[in-house]
Amino acid sequence: MAKPGVLTPQAEDFPRWYQDVVAKAELADNGPVRGTMVIRPTGYALWERIQREMDDRIKAAGAQNAYFPLFIPQSYLAREAEHVEGFAPELAVVTHAGGKELEEPIVVRPTSETVIGEFMAKWVQSYRDLPLLLNQWANVVRWELRPRVFLRTTEFLWQEGHTAHASREDASAYARRILHEAYQDVIAGVLGIPVVVGCKTVKERFAGAINTMTLESMMRDGKALQMGTSHELGQNFARAFGIEYTSDTGSREHAWTTSWGSTTRMVGALVMAHGDDNGMRVPPNLAPVQVLVMVVKAGDGVAEAAEQLVDDLRAAGVRVALDDRVDTAFGRRAVDAELKGVPVRIEVGPRDLADQKVTLVRRIAGSKTPTELTAVVTAAKAALAEDQDVLYSEALERREKSTVDVATVADAAEAAKTGWARIPWSTLGVEGEAELAKDAVSVRVL
Amino acid sequence: MAKPGVLTPQAEDFPRWYQDVVAKAELADNGPVRGTMVIRPTGYALWERIQREMDDRIKAAGAQNAYFPLFIPQSYLAREAEHVEGFAPELAVVTHAGGKELEEPIVVRPTSETVIGEFMAKWVQSYRDLPLLLNQWANVVRWELRPRVFLRTTEFLWQEGHTAHASREDASAYARRILHEAYQDVIAGVLGIPVVVGCKTVKERFAGAINTMTLESMMRDGKALQMGTSHELGQNFARAFGIEYTSDTGSREHAWTTSWGSTTRMVGALVMAHGDDNGMRVPPNLAPVQVLVMVVKAGDGVAEAAEQLVDDLRAAGVRVALDDRVDTAFGRRAVDAELKGVPVRIEVGPRDLADQKVTLVRRIAGSKTPTELTAVVTAAKAALAEDQDVLYSEALERREKSTVDVATVADAAEAAKTGWARIPWSTLGVEGEAELAKDAVSVRVL
Ligand SMILES: [Zn+2]
Ligand SMILES: [Zn+2]
């Protein structure tokens, strides 16, 4: 359906293909300041759906949303030396405001960690205040020298969770709960992307964490993408910020904290995990529009039939939209829907309709089936359920094919050129990890 | 119920009462950078509910959400001289990033208007691209010398809508549609705050607008608060940004645009429009928690009965929460619920329960009624519906009482000391407006 040559083929140049999809599916544009992006309605609708699904699960896990300021006094970032070193070249600094130079420069938040730590210390007094489970949806800024839309941008949108607990066990369980019940559930169940879930090596751990857990997914070029992380911070963070509480026996204790985050990078992952040479393929569970009813061209009763279908699909609980722009060539509209990855299209044209038929087009399975008008709502719903699984299975199969079990560090380096390698940590160890790093191969997950 | 002296009484010092409520109801704290705020979970839950209700209506009006960058090149704001003068002292400017000084300073968006204008010009080519209906939820920064939490803060959260149309009529109708179907519907119908809707005088108009429409509400101190604005920008904005399209007859035309915004200020308005000396009174249609089921103290079957009630209320479509923190004094928890303005509380205690009774407490009506356990779900739902109306009617009555019809400019100035004055524009006119300005009285709405 898509005109050949619209997109650079994946096999030819994957990063170029990705850029093409982002542009042609109207997901995003580059912003005027280098490294920033304009998220267009098609891209933002995907993010909104991801956000909603994630937010529901974060709330179900008991966390509450709050909002902390964009601006952080520079002195806050000096507090925890380890972190500042990590961020310094990434920071954007406000030096002028209110028409004059500021006495103390202000940093645009690269994360709200320091401010949240400050306020947690204020809010936590007694064991009764624990656990304190906070989450924030916000924009953050980290200066990027080699930006890539959605994947690595100077400004991005994310959620960051920060929790404080009375015991190590409780903190540890909560970090895992978010990892599985929020992140894994959304990424695997909604985005249809298989994940390998596990711990990072000491080398790859978040600064200050006693344990960093990660979800890693394979993109269609065989590369890994980190989909989210959840950290156990032990009492390190609480010590740095003075998050102390009086226990039920009256003693003063440091809290045990966690932090966890996921970002607009997931939109990029969605493109790269499922897309093909015709564009995106959006999993039905995520799709803002699951079924697009398209009027092929004007004709007797066509518009009415299409509208009736939209009503019927909506009543059946389907997220549906109508494309009745008959003054735009049908082929062009079909290519556009293909590029944007709408899971199911129902094409309503005068000729088919004379036989009480419409055409059901499945983006994921790649099929095109004449279907009785009376049967199409049921058929569409079945296709949505089926194709969610198809997408996941395909991605899982691809990953399994591209992952080899290896026994030596040299074999691991070789395998990493085209996919993933699975190697026992007892074989690899810290020295093997250092060895692989020379070939720009990283140990993603234990 | 609330301990006397917890809040400064409204009659004594209204601004102080407001500050007390914001602090004691745990709505927000001051951020570390002057003028910024930390929106705490209780306050943010209110904002999230407002946002959801507003977003649903904005989408129903056909607009799509998008996201534009936080950072704007300084040169963008020089483009439209009229606006820059308005903003210059309000701007926060980033001069350093990536570890060095920037060649061109970057402004933290005070609005996304200029960037959106730039991209609209790119996206609008043909009449087929119109109307283009965009909305954005984001944080913006305007340096404030006299900040007040929620009402006037250096950083605030808002939505800004920007639309482009093929005709003046279409633009005009859309600006009105948002005004009524989104803003008025949410403010009056959900927040329960009466609004006077109308046009601003030429003097009070938004720079560049050919018509600014506003919604004005009266707070409990008799003062007006602007709840939202919707602007018709004619072709001025399109000319400044080059938003042109080819019409269906092939001619090149400037688009007609609108813009409209509403902010976290609405949370402050909610406090000031309905609150009393015991704290907030949250309208049931908005309330994140409509009914709080409280375990008074532990006892035979009390916890089970409370949990059953929560399930029953949830099944009846009520937003419900459970307070079973029996290790915290009941009086303290009741005062807290009162401060936070939870519309309905159901107190479950061992003594009442022995008689198969609970106590229904209505925050808005101020009543406390022993109620049969079997009847309390129905009673709670009835109370929620009734008290939404009570709150609106009370606010309307107060406004009517505090608004006087006057015939002279002098009388208007006098009336404005304690409330509002209604005066024919034919009597007032531009000169009368200038006269009133000397007494710091503004003409809010025509
Ligand atoms: Zn830390
Ligand atoms: Zn303008």
Image (cartoon, coloured by chain):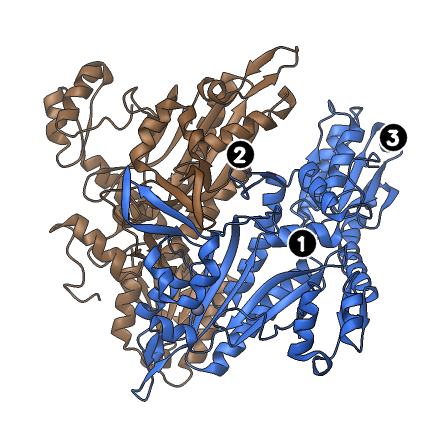
Chain colours: A brown, B blue
Give whichever of A220, A151 is nearer the camera: A151
The N terminus of chain A: image quadrant: bottom left
Disc number lying in front (1 or 3): 1
Q: Position of residue A307 (x, y in %)?
A: 46, 74
User: Relative to residue A42, is residue A427 drawn left or right?
Assistant: left
Residue highlighted by disc 3: B354
Tell me, yes or no, whether the two marked residues, 1 and 2, touch with CB atoms within 8 Å.
Answer: no
Q: In which quarter of the image is ligand 1?
A: top left
Q: Pointer 3 indicates a residue of which chain?
A: B
Q: What residue type is labelled 3?
A: Ala
Q: Return the x and y of residue A396 as percentages of the image width and height.
A: 27, 39
Query: Can the viewer see residue A196?
Result: no
Left/right of residue B225 with respect to residue B411 in the rendered view? left
Return the x and y of residue A443 as percentages of the image width and height.
Answer: 23, 26
Q: Mark 1 points at which residue?
A: B269
User: Is B3 drawn above or below residue B140 in the view shown?
Assistant: above
Question: What residue lies at 61% left-to-right and 74% top-to-bottom?
Answer: B201
Residue type, label 1: Ala
Mark 1 vs mark 3, CA separation in Å = 43 Å
Structural crowding at the residue carrying mark 2, measured as other residues with C-alpha within 10 Å and reported as few (<14), some (14–19) or many (≥20): many
Compared to B12, does B403 lie above or below? Answer: below
Where's residue B426, x and y in %?
71, 83
The numbered dot on residue A134 is: 2
Tell me whether marks 1 and 3 sit on the same chain. yes
Q: Helix or strand or loop: what does disc 3 sit on?
A: helix
Say which mark, if any, is on residue A36: none
